[in-house]
Amino acid sequence: MTARQSGFTLIEMMIALLIFALLAAAGVSLLSFGVRAQAVAGKKLDDVGALYRLDGVLEADLAQASPRSTRDEGGARRPAFESGGGGRLLRLVRGGWDNVDGAPRASLQKVEYRLNDEGAIERIAYPMLDGAAPLPAARMLTNVAGVTLRYRLAGAWSDSWSGQPATPLPDAVEMTITRRDGTVFRELFAIGTGNVMGAGIGNAG
């Protein structure tokens, strides 16, 4: 009687291959889910970081706001602090402009915040206070559906601002940012170095 040869039958091999295929598919699915989750988390962290960077830059600009009026490219006089018009959110003159290279310029700088047609808040700086064209815009925050502003002066809030020679700057600005996903953030900024109201980001929705 001959000895029986050891090995796998065709059915056993098919079952083993099926189990291996199921395990491989599960592994690929789990890896794909992990990659997608990491990408979503990274995008969310980048977005939160952009929101806080905008908050920090705005706080620094508004805290150093100056009552100095300027002139535009056509020579027309512009107020020290203005809002609205053609997508513009704010335009102001701020102090404390670093001059590492010792260039022959003032320490004051004109800056502007604008909501563009793509739903992005941009910060635009000017190389000179009077008559200069703006520098390229820096994109600060994307996916913005809308921005509303309120201005505080002498204890009262207003939805619009028109500075007068005696009151060129408001005491504070409230900015409400509505994102395209419906999330709403409310930010409060003090104007000028003499104010003590702190800036902050609050989720209002």
Image (tube, helix red, strand yellow):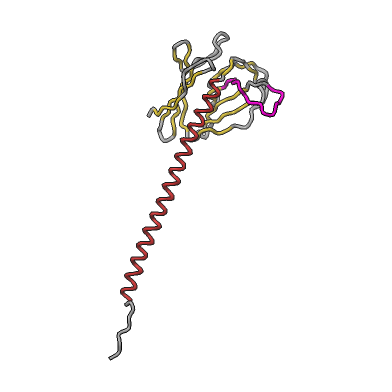
Q: Is residue 175 left or right of residue 12?
A: right
Task: Please state the total of marks drawn on the protein image.
Answer: 0
Question: Residue shown at 53%/32% (left/top)?
Answer: 140
Question: Residue shown at 58%/20% (left/top)?
Answer: 92
Relative depth, front residue between 164 and 199: 199
Which of the 4 quarters of the picture holds residue 31?
A: bottom left
Q: Is residue 203 left or right of residue 171?
A: left
Question: Residue shown at 59%/14% (left/top)?
Answer: 67
Q: Main secondary structure of the magenta part?
A: loop
Residue 186 magenta: no
- Residue 196: percent from the left, percent from the top? 48, 17
> Looking at the image, is 34 positioned above or below residue 44?
below
- Residue 48: percent from the left, percent from the top? 46, 35
Relative depth, front residue between 191 and 74: 191
- Residue 42: percent from the left, percent from the top? 46, 43
- Residue 50: percent from the left, percent from the top? 50, 34
Relative depth, front residue between 78 and 169: 169
Residue 97 magenta: yes
Hey, which residue is sitting farthest top in the picture?
A: 166
Q: Identify the image quadrant of the N terminus.
A: bottom left
Q: Is residue 187 left or right of residue 22?
A: right
> Looking at the image, is 17 positioned above or below residue 159?
below
Q: What residue range appears in magenta? A: 91-105
Q: Identify the image quadrant of the C terminus.
A: top left
Q: Is residue 192 left or right of residue 155?
A: right
